[in-house]
Image (cartoon, rainbow, N blue to C red):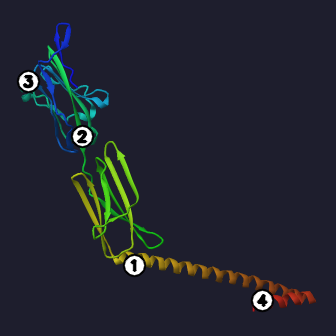
């Protein structure tokens, strides 16, 4: 929406002689690249003696870049834009007030206002900037086995914008069902995605593919027989250890009971020698029968 005004002394009124023009569609760019936000005066007149102000509308009208009195004045510029903005001074004479934004960040996405003011008129235009970010190459990690011998494979990729699609594929290109898909969004670093699958086949290739519009990255892993053999070996070792522990526990229990009964037998033997009664003789025979 344009708000053109002509200024005559202390009076201002709507003016159709000049206007500020810009793109009708959003400007698209990729994080890390440079981008130009188009803005110019129609018909083309010099803007050298004008005030050219770029403002970030979705950040409470914060100043992105200010040109005035034939120079850049960026003392009140947003900190995140320091050293990354410029107008083309050689193009100002042609009415070109476009802004160059270097090393675009994900957080730069938003609505920008190009405001131009002269001694006799003012006008502005809004430019929408959309930033895409191509994330990191997917990283596949082996996350151990479950109780049934299934191998957990986890794939993660970070730094995407907008949110990408992550899929697992087998060697035949068939999409596999992911378990516990996890997506995290950060205003600075974009989207991180993480998906896990459980596989049971050896010597099979699995692909992790991350796609966002026309961008795609892929990683792969081959599950070897040795991976599953290591799991089976671990299961066997654990099973043997459990069995040995149970046997050892039984033997220790038997040994302790035997020792206790032997001690009681010695006690009654001594009592028999000191006082040979029928009751002590019965207890002696009972314990002797148990331990033999």
**Coordinates of residue 252 in the picture (x, y in percent):** 65, 81
Name the mark nearer the viewer: 2 or 1. 2
Tell me if mark 2 has few (under 14), some (14-19) or many (20+) residues whose alpha carbon lies within 10 angstroms of its own. some
Q: CA distance from mark 2 to mark 1?
A: 50 Å
Q: Secondary structure at mark 1?
A: helix
Q: CA distance from mark 4 to mark 3?
A: 116 Å
* Spatial CA span between label 4 and label 1: 48 Å
Is 103 or 161 nearer to us in this picture? 161
Which of label 3 and label 2 is nearer to you?
3
Q: Which of 261/213 is in front? A: 213
Q: Which residue is mark 4?
A: 290
Determine which residue is flagged by label 3: 43
Which of marks 2 and 3 precedes in the sequence? Answer: 3
Q: Which residue is mark 1?
A: 229
Query: Which residue shows up at 60% across the image and 79% down it?
Result: 246
Q: Secondary structure at mark 4?
A: helix
Secondary structure at badge 3 equals loop
Mark identifier at residue 148: none
Eyeballing the image, is 251 above or below 89? Answer: below
Residue picked out by circle 2: 130
Question: Residue 290 in the image: x percent, y percent?
Answer: 77, 89
């Amino acid at each position: 929406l344009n708000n053109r005004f002509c200024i005559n002394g202390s009076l201002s009124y709507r003016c159709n002689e000049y206007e500020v023009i810009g793109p009708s569609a959003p400007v698209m760019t990729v994080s890390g690249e440079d981008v130009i936000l188009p803005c110019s005066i129609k018909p083309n007149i010099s803007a050298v003696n004008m005030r050219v102000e770029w403002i970030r509308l979705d950040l409470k009208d914060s100043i992105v870049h200010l040109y005035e009195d034939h120079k850049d004045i960026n003392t009140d510029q947003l900190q995140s834009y320091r050293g990354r903005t410029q107008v083309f001074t050689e193009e100002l004479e042609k009415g070109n007030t476009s802004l160059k934004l270097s090393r675009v960040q994900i957080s730069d996405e938003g609505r920008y206002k190009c405001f131009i003011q002269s001694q006799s008129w003012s006008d502005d235009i809004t430019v929408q900037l959309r930033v895409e970010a191509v994330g990191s190459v997917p990283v596949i990690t082996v996350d151990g086995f479950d109780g049934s011998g299934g191998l957990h494979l986890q794939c993660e990729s970070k730094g995407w914008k907008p949110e990408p699609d992550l899929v697992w594929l087998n060697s035949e290109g068939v999409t596999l069902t992911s378990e516990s898909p996890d997506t995290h969004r950060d205003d600075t670093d974009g989207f991180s995605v993480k998906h896990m699958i459980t596989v049971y086949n050896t010597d099979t290739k699995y692909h992790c593919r991350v796609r966002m519009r026309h961008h795609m990255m892929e990683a792969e892993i081959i599950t070897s027989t040795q991976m599953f053999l290591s799991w089976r070996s671990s299961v066997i070792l654990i099973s043997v250890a459990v069995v040995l522990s149970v046997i050892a526990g039984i033997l220790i229990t038997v040994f302790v009971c035997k020792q206790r009964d032997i001690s009681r037998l010695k006690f009654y033997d001594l009592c028999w020698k000191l006082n040979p009664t029928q009751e002590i003789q019965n207890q002696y025979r009972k314990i002797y029968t148990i331990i033999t």
